[in-house]
Image (cartoon, rainbow, N blue to C red):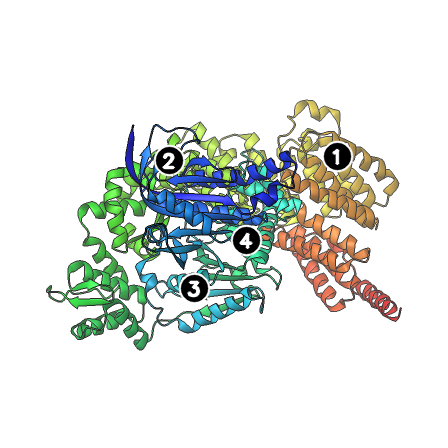
Amino acid sequence: MRADRRMVTALFCDIVNSSHMVIPQDPEDAYDQLSGLIDIMRRHVAAFGGTICQTLGDGIYAVFGAPVALENHAVRACFAADGILREVARGGRAVRIGMASGEVLWDHDVGGQTFNPATGATVHIAAKLQQICPSNRALMADTTARLAADWVETAESSLVVLAGEEPLQTHLLASVRSRRRQYEDELPMVGRENIRSYLLSTLDGVARGISGFSAHLVQAAPGLGKTRLIRSIADSARTAGVRVLEWQVPPVEPVGAVSPMHQLVSEMLDGPLPRTPEGLSAMLRAAGAQPEQADALSRILLPTVTDNQDRGTSAILSLAAAALAMLVRHAADRRPILLLVEDAHWADTAVQATLAALADLPEATRLLLVLTSREEGLNPAIAGHRRLSHHKLGPLSIADTSSLLDNWLGRYPGLDRIKLDLSRRARGNPFFLVECIRVLMMNGTLLGDVGDMRPGEVPAFPLPDSLQALLSVRIDMLTEDARRVLRIAAVTGTTFDATLLSRLIGAEVTGRFLPDLVRLGLIDETRLLPRQEFSFHHALLHEAVYSGITRRDRRHIHGQLAALLDLDDFAELSGRLAAQARHAAAGELWSLAVRAGVAAGREALNRSLAAEAVSLLSIAVEANEKLPISQDSVVAGIDLRIALAKAAMPAGMGERAIAELDRAVALARRAGDESRAMVGLVQQINYEWVYGSLDQALVLAASAISYSGGEPAAHPEVLIIAASCHIENDDPASAVRLLDIAAGSGLRTVHVAGRYTMLNVDMMISIKKARCLALMGRPHDAEPLIQHALRLADADMFPFNRVFVRADIAEIRLRQRRFGDVLAYSSESLSLSRSTGAPLFDAVNLARRGLALSYMGRGIAGLADIDQGLGIAIARGAALHVAKARQCRALALALTGQLQMAQQERAAAAILADERGFRLLAGQLPSLAELTEIAAQARSNLNLLSIR
């Protein structure tokens, strides 16, 4: 027999009342239900590295730690058990789980799932615990609870007597932790009792349904105890049975870590996510998300790499965040939730959008949202949200500092002098105080355990008066090898993947030094599964380590990391491209920085992270300028700046966009590249038309036409874009002239189609000319062109044609006051834009649809649509769309009798139209007299309804 002894955790799981589920059913239906539940068990066991030993009809028996040894086998078993319980409960079923840890004899020759390869008391105990476990709970032996204590919360259960054995203490699994427990977590909270009690009292009210949704922001300078406070609240919440979700927002997305959005969706759906956008969207819809919201969220979590970057906009992200908020709302109906967001000042675009959506959840939602932030850096839109209560932490008082010292050092009288000196130096900063204590423990000035220390024989050690200097002292006290590991980790990031670090410096080195660095409080193990991850204990500590590395060493390590991330082993890691771009730039590997920056920028746009895309494409632009000047680098520089400008527009960085376009056009002209110069110029027109000044767009359009050799020689697509500017300038006659030239057959054979737009040229000419004729009072002449444009768009392979034509038809129908058609076409355009991921017109479509609803007597729904559209337009900085949404809002407010607000909205729209030169819109604004008449009629109608 080929067998050996192994330390494992055995897990037994079976379905509660499986007979009642099977007996009344048709055999095939019973099989489907049983196999579905068994599949859930098997999937979670496999996800956490377990081995299925037997399938037992209505359950499974699995082992963690064999045949492959796993140091953290008990933790893995608990995580698998937690996943099984949550996913099964979500489907309305129940299971029982028993777990025990200990030594077994593992027979490597036993294969399949018919015979048991593990023999020993551990297996027997796990099976017995499963039999006596309460429904939909996991019961574990004391051995398992002790091994997993740093990663799970348990509740002590009963003593169990097994045949001939001593009574066995058992524990019920309460929850799993997102980060490893630290010994200071067990110390009493000092100086923050009032805010802690207040937040826990609020959480109790939320959990019991006494009070509703509550959101709080805890702000403080670095080192004043924000993290310690929320971890204490999290521990109390877990003990009370509240579901705790923790986000620690890093300054830069770590390699290999799932995004906060992905993490929260996985938690809300109680299981692993499908691997395709279609499968994920279907799961999200089943969980309660609206179809367009589910599609948007699935696209962001599982982006498809394509060349179409129009989807990377705030509109898609807004829909995705709304879907996520809906999932949280439904999950909170089942069990109250505490969501902790640490270091929100580093939140990326996706986290900010999610927080905004969560802050608008209904009052009845059983959610307590707590954010922490430094005193500066938090997005003003979040910090100023009307539902966010603010709490500021200040330095500890002298009495609180004394209590903290007693908790760490104990009350031995011989420590009084040291305590007095530490209190003076720390000046109420608990992080500084604890770091001082750690230095004194490392050099022997303090001996013993936390809470029971004595003075050492080492003479008094002089401590620096600044935190930065103190942290440098701590680092210098390490051995050379440990210091080298810590410094390489600091270059990797504030949070780093253990496997990546091991490949850089060797698994044996990391295995030897990382546990010591954890023990010394320099780094923390912040994730165990599915990939082991560590973080620096504090951002200030990371800054101190990184700043102590020479520029030459930093450059060398960054370069090594960039090259390492090019290997196939790391190709599937999330955040790989972004990290590679940053490491390559810092390592001065310019070619790699360009390649990775471009790829990472596209990836960010596919995830609707426009601001992050700007940052990454900027790396590529700057790296490209470091390369030797050549034809290829010049061309790449032009293309990169145009791509950067396209990303900056939806990010609301208008000045940056126009600056990059100016530079791209100048570079192209200097290089004699007329084609790229025209591309940049046309992009400038598109920017100014929607985001900037219409007068400037008209000047640029005239310049582009002149640059092309005049109107008869210009590219039809340039003429169409220029005509569109003339329409917004309330000059339909000039627009018709340009459109007629563009329709001439001669130009089609000279110019390449699709150079400046992917839209169907004939469709654009038809719909733009129809709009001009409608403005000129010729609706009957416009109608055939509308129908022709609609047929061309629907027959074209490029889906955005269908979005575009319906948006323009809705505009025409709005002028004709055909509100049913406005509602239909704007809704169709919205639906198509969301299904194709190209929501360029979502803001104006929502505004028009809202106005149509308001005219049709659905004022509340109409204003909700308009407000959503206005919010999208403002977020994108699209001035033309903001002005149109305000025009619609003024009319909708008047239609609901809110005259004063309508007048204010009209004034805002008029100011914007005047500033940006939107003459057509300015002429279409209702007068104050018209608004007064509309509001009076609305109030009269309400009075008639109340009489009836």
Q: Nearer the viewer, mark 4 or mark 1?
A: 4
For disc 1, the neighbor class at 10 Å (few under 14, some 14 to 19, many from 20) is many
Q: What amino acid is found at the position of numbered circle 1 in the picture?
A: Ile
The residue positioned farthest toward the bottom in the image shown: 399
Q: Nearer the viewer, mark 4 or mark 3?
A: 3
Which sits earlier in the primary sequence, circle 4 or circle 1? Answer: 4
Which sits earlier in the primary sequence, circle 3 or circle 1? Answer: 3
Q: Which residue is mark 2?
A: 565
Q: Is residue 179 above or below residue 275?
A: below
Q: Nearer the viewer, residue 124 or 447?
A: 124
Which sits earlier in the primary sequence, circle 4 or circle 3? Answer: 3
**Residue at the location (31% across, 77% down)?**
399
Which sits earlier in the primary sequence, circle 2 or circle 3? Answer: 3
Left or right, residue 910 beside residue 3: right
Q: Are marks 2 and 4 in contact (CB under 8 Å)?
A: no
Q: Are marks 2 and 1 in contact (CB under 8 Å)?
A: no
Q: Nearer the viewer, mark 2 or mark 3?
A: 3
Q: What amino acid is found at the position of numbered circle 2 in the picture?
A: Leu
Q: Position of residue 397 (x, y in %)?
A: 33, 75
For disc 4, the neighbor class at 10 Å (few under 14, some 14 to 19, many from 20) is many
State the separation of the CA atoms marked 3 and 1.
65 Å
Q: What amino acid is found at the position of numbered circle 4 in the picture?
A: Thr
Q: Nearer the viewer, residue 870 or 731?
A: 870
Q: Which residue is mark 1?
A: 765
Q: Which residue is mark 3?
A: 236
Q: Position of residue 848 (x, y in %)?
A: 74, 51
Left or right, residue 494 beside residue 612: left
Q: Which residue is mark 4?
A: 354
Q: Are marks 3 and 1 in contact (CB under 8 Å)?
A: no
Q: What amino acid is found at the position of numbered circle 3 in the picture?
A: Ser
